[in-house]
Amino acid sequence: MSIRPVRRILQSHATMEGAGVRLRRAFGFGDTSDFDPFLLLDDFRNENPEDYLAGFPWHPHRGIETITYVLAGTVEHGDSLGNRGTLGGGDVQWMTAGSGILHQEMPKGDPQGRMHGFQLWANLPSSLKMTAPRYQDVQARDIPEVVDDDGTRARVICGSFWGQSGPVDGVAADPRYLDVSVPPGTTRRLPVEHPRHAFAYVFAGSGHFRDASEPLPVATEPVGYAETAGAEKAENRALVLFDGGDEIVVQAGDQGIRFLLVSGTPIQEPVAWHGPIVMNTQEQLQQAFKELHQRNFIK
């Protein structure tokens, strides 16, 4: 087994989306080849309702899958196919936009005004860009959690891990999506098979991710995000991008650590991307927006 070195650690940055939702972006809207097949990860954690109640009114998607994971509060959603529902704490919605869908997501928060969740975008290969849209709505009680002897816990949202399989299936990139908690002071090795691309996003506590035999590279130029070069400690809202290998190593800090661990098989296809529509060529992208303007976007 080979330990994955840390390629770099990035601090998520503040941005605004939708009708005025303040959130933190871990990566997205740039060169995402290092994250292929994933395109974007947003952390919409907020305790001020004024910063999120405007929500994400009706907007289109084509050519991707969007994965919404709610930890606190609620998100009301609806789409052009007539689907309606509410996501609560611990719930997941895996939406395959495929050939095109119009939908909205309106965060409502909990009684204390807290809203916390993540949205991950996964690319679709060219053969599935125009597939029929579909939803996989998963309630918290249906997501398995595995607990090891040392107290390490993992909620298995998608993929297989420690003998459990997540409820989300049939996804193009064959991803693994885990919510991992490691107790204070504990060191764990977690499998992430080659040749998957993999990253961790820390959202509670802190810890060290490292290959003890390899020093981290020192960044020579900006990458568009706050980058921690030559360091291995990852704290709240930090994204850890791993290099190749078969497993990662994490040592939890004094308060423990909780993070998303996401991996997937690279698609390795051209990306033509504008806003919520991701295709393979500029011609396909222009056609999508033409159809949106002519109101024949939905197939």
Image: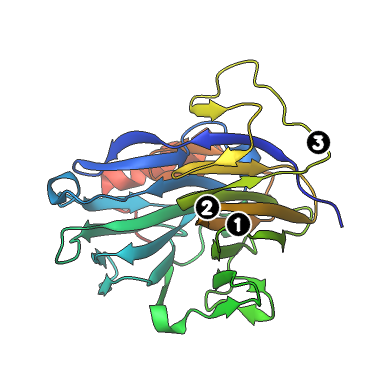
Q: Is residue 261 something one can see in this rendering?
A: yes
Question: Spatial distance from mark 2 to mark 1, Cα to Cα?
Answer: 6 Å
Q: Is residue 105 above or below residue 34?
A: below
Mark 1 or mark 3: whose residue is earlier in sequence: 1
Q: Residue at x 60, y 16 (%)?
A: 221
Q: Amino acid at mark 3?
A: Glu
Q: Amino acid at mark 2?
A: Asp
Question: Spatial distance from mark 3 to mark 2, Cα to Cα?
Answer: 24 Å
Decide: marks 2, 1 in contact (CB < 8 A)? yes
Q: Which residue is mark 2?
A: 254
For the residue pair 128 and 142, the one nearer the viewer reads as: 142
Q: Which residue is mark 3?
A: 214
Q: Is residue 7 left or right of residue 108?
A: right
Q: Position of residue 238 (x, y in %)?
A: 49, 41
Tell me the crowding category of disc 2: few under 14, some 14 to 19, or many 20 or more residues within 10 angstroms, Cα based.
few
Q: On residue 185, which mark appears?
A: 1
The extreme top residue here reads 220
Mark 3 or mark 2: whose residue is earlier in sequence: 3
Decide: marks 3, 2 in contact (CB < 8 A)? no
